Image: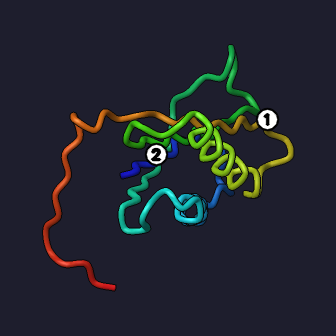
Amino acid sequence: MPHLTIEYTDNLPQFNISGALLALNKALVASGHFEEVDIKSRAIQIGTFLIGTSSDNRAFVHVKLAILCGRSIQIKHELSESLLHVLKESEWPTKTHVQLCVEVQEIEREAYSKSFIGSLVA
């Protein structure tokens, strides 16, 4: 835990997704709430999308952070803001309206299972 998912529209060819994933993971580590090895991130490119009633010159990046329940609303807000700050630091096109969003979701502890296989090589 946590699980981080970036969904982004395919009309952002300059979006450095690998760099963004690394920067977002580093922000989560810096928060002090997560161990580096526990962060699982992935990116999903969205080819079919609509923003409002048009997709012309419009794009979005939506980060979903799923964490175990029990953290205060203040901590969830701080996590959301820090991830949004990382997204804002990326290079964005000037002629495209890009919406950046971050959502923090809770996973019930009693419904989450985790196991390790193999050793961690540093």
- Along the horizontal axis of the image, is 34 left or right of 117? right
Q: Nearer the viewer, residue 2 or 23?
A: 2
Task: Please give the name of the residue rendered at 68% of the width and 26% of the height, measured from the top-left corner.
Answer: 55
Query: For the view shown, which residue lies furthest in the left direction?
Result: 117
Classify 80 as above or below 50. below
Rendered location of residue 98, percent (x, y): 74, 38
Query: For the view shown, which residue lies furthest in the top direction?
Result: 53
Color theme of the render: rainbow
Classify 47 as above or below 14. above
Task: Please give the name of the residue rendered at 62% of the width and 61% of the height, measured from the top-left corner.
Answer: 16
The amino acid marked with disc number 1 is His
Q: CA distance from mark 2 to mark 1?
A: 21 Å
Instruction: Name the residue tied to disc 2.
Output: 5
Task: Please give the name of the residue rendered at 54% of the width and 58% of the height, measured from the top-left corner.
Answer: 28
Rendered location of residue 115, percent (x, y): 16, 57
Query: For the view shown, which residue lies furthest in the right direction?
Result: 94
Q: Nearer the viewer, residue 45 or 75?
A: 75
Classify 65 as above or below 117. above
- The local secondary structure at tag 2 comes to strand
Q: Earlier in the sequence, mark 2 or mark 1?
A: 2
Instruction: Name the residue tied to disc 1.
Output: 97
Check whether the beta carbons of the residues at disc 2 and disc 1 lie within 8 A of each other. no
The amino acid marked with disc number 2 is Thr
- The image quadrant that residue 24 belongs to is bottom right
Residue 24 seen in this snapshot: yes
What quarter of the picture does the C terminus occupy?
A: bottom left
- Along the horizontal axis of the image, is 94 left or right of 43? right
Q: Nearer the viewer, residue 47 or 39?
A: 39
Rendered location of residue 81, percent (x, y): 68, 44
Circle 2 residues within 10 Å: few <14, some 14–19, many ≥20: some
* In this view, the mark in front (2 or 1): 2
- The local secondary structure at tag 1 comes to strand
